[in-house]
């Protein structure tokens, strides 16, 4: 579950609200121990996802760095190469 959470800080273009929401959902799923909550727990999951997404957005807005922003395409290519090397037989 948690492998889908990606670094969101210091990218050009910046993280979108959808990316923040997806990371929050993955975090709550990991902590909650399930990818599909019961109907009884759905409201609690939704509330937690909203809170985590809000906290994440605040964090990203307040972080400061002197490093140049990373390019999403270049970082994705590096990740694909690492995966190719890792899973090569």
Image (spheres, rainbow, N blue to C red):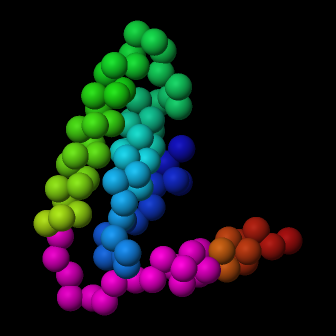
Image position of 47 (left or right of 24): left
Give the percent coordinates (x, y) of residue 10. 31, 76
Give the percent coordinates (x, y) of residue 54. 22, 46
Location of the C terminus by quadrant is bottom right
The answer to whether residue 82 of the structure is visible from this angle is: no
Q: Quick check: 55 above or below 33?
A: below
The answer to whether residue 64 of the structure is visible from this angle is: yes
Q: Which residue lies furthest to the top in this view?
A: 40
Please tell me which residue is depicted at 52% across the width and 53% down the height of the picture.
Answer: 4
Give the percent coordinates (x, y) of residue 30. 45, 38
Q: Quick check: 3 above or below 25?
A: below
Image position of 41 (left or right of 64): right
Please tell me which residue is depicted at 40% across the width and 19% down the height of the picture.
Answer: 42
Span of residues in magenta: 63-79
Q: Quick check: 20 above or below 83?
A: above
Magenta-span inclusion, residue 67: yes
Q: Between 41 and 30, which is closer to the camera in this rendering?
A: 41
Q: Between 76 and 81, which is closer to the camera in this rendering?
A: 76
Please tell me which residue is depicted at 38% across the width and 75% down the height of the picture.
Answer: 13
Toward which corner of the image does residue 43 lie, by quadrant? Answer: top left
Please tell me which residue is depicted at 47% across the width and 30% down the height of the picture.
Answer: 33
Magenta-span inclusion, residue 86: no
């Amino acid at each position: 579950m948690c492998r889908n959470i990606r670094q969101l800080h210091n990218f050009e273009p910046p993280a979108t609200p959808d990316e923040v929401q997806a990371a929050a959902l993955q975090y709550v799923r990991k902590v909650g121990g399930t990818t599909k909550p019961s109907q009884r727990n759905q409201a609690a999951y939704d509330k937690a996802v909203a809170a985590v997404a809000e906290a994440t957005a605040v964090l990203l807005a307040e972080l400061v760095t002197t490093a140049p922003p990373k390019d999403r395409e270049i970082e994705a290519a590096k990740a694909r190469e690492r995966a190719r090397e890792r899973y090569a037989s």
